[in-house]
Amino acid sequence: MSNITTTDPDIEPRFLPIATFSVPAAALASALYFATVPFLIYAVVRIKPGPRGVDTRSPYVNLALDFGIGRAVAFILRAVLINNFSFGLLLGYALPFGSALPGPCIQITVLTRVWALKAVALGVDLVPGRTIKQKAGIVNLVFLASLLILLGGGVPMIIMASIWVVHNKPGEPQHDLGVRLRLACDSLLVLAMVCTILIGFGFLKKLRQFDMSKLRQLSPVKKKVEENGKGESESTAGDSPESLMEALPIKIDAIEAISKLRDGLTRLIIPCATLLLARLVAGLCYLPTDSFVGTYSNEATWYPFVVGFEILTIITLVQTRSYAYINVPWPSLEDDVEEEVKNEMEESSTETRVTATGEER
């Protein structure tokens, strides 16, 4: 390791901007990111788990916490780098700095999926002409496709780009390919956030048009009547009607549920996606395509527009009130009996019409 100066003959010219790094600015940024960690942990603890298959505490939901810690460590390395320059330390800074960025984007995608499933469960007609089960399937399919693109494509591209750009000089094939991969990944994240914002406003429009009288409620739960002082929580097919009772479900207040769904969009999903989009666009404006990923020539404007937007995103993510929609009771994502009967009647009617048409011919 060695100190680096703008006139150091042993350092490649592309690394000389590191000499202009501000140690106090990097230390302050690291302290700000570390300060957000307790609030991120508190937000994670306050989020209640959803039903089976809709686990709101999956590892993907906690990526904002990983992002905050990763950014804090990266800026510590940035502060150390100027006085202790080495390729290993440089790569150690570039990797967490670049690869952490898809984390909050993936988390917003996860939160959008949970919001959509909750809205579908409550009866909001997000996908017209489909049953509850079909709507839930469409939401999960879109989510899995988004996750595959962001997690399976974005993260590996950033990691490979950081390695190739650091270890290869400008003009070499791998360096240029690394720069293209970084640009492609950032563009992919920009597209994902634009789609999230558009989908969020579309959901908001559907929510405003929703008839609250059609809000779905929790289904009654069958439980056995207590016998000999001991109760059982499940029933079997052989239980007699006399040994069973209906446990009255919690009544979901329509106004409160819709209000919490609206807050989830207007206070969490749309604002976070907008802030991340602004940060991504700012990052692309400062990305030095002629050097290596990580050197920025003007920190005076880079910190406010890049680090500032990231801190604002984390502040928005830790507002626990915005997660209230997750804590609304979950009606079943299975089709209602009335809906199944209606579908069967429609199918029977269609078959009857086809038969009648065939007989006329």
Image (spheres, rainbow, N blue to C red):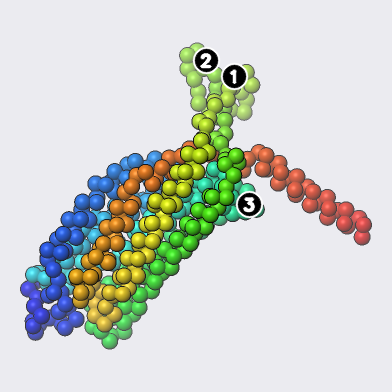
Residue drawn 18% across the image and 58% down it? 30
Checking the image for residue 243, the label placed there is 1
What type is the residue that disc 1 sits on? Ser
Residue drawn 13% across the image and 74% down it? 20
Horizontal and vertical percent for residue 140? 51, 54
Marks 1 and 2, how far apart in space?
9 Å
Q: Is residue 202 above or below residue 238?
A: below
Horizontal and vertical percent for residue 221? 55, 29
Left or right: residue 322 compared with residue 253: left
- Farthest residue, direction top: 228
Q: Mark 1 or mark 2: name the one nearer the start of the chain.
A: 2
Residue contact at pointers 2 and 3, CB within 8 angstroms: no
Which residue is nearer to you in this view: 91 or 261? 261
- Which-is-in-front pick, marks 2 and 3? 3
Report crowding for label 2: few under 14, some 14 to 19, many 20 or more residues within 10 A (C-alpha).
few
Marks 2 and 3, how far apart in space?
43 Å
Which residue is nearer to you in this view: 212 or 229? 212
Q: Is residue 354 visible?
A: yes
Name the quadrant containing residue 105: bottom left
Local SS, label 3: loop
What type is the residue that disc 2 sits on? Glu
Horizontal and vertical percent for residue 179? 31, 78
Checking the image for residue 130, the label placed there is 3
Left or right: residue 352 compared with residue 99: right
Checking the image for residue 227, the label placed there is 2
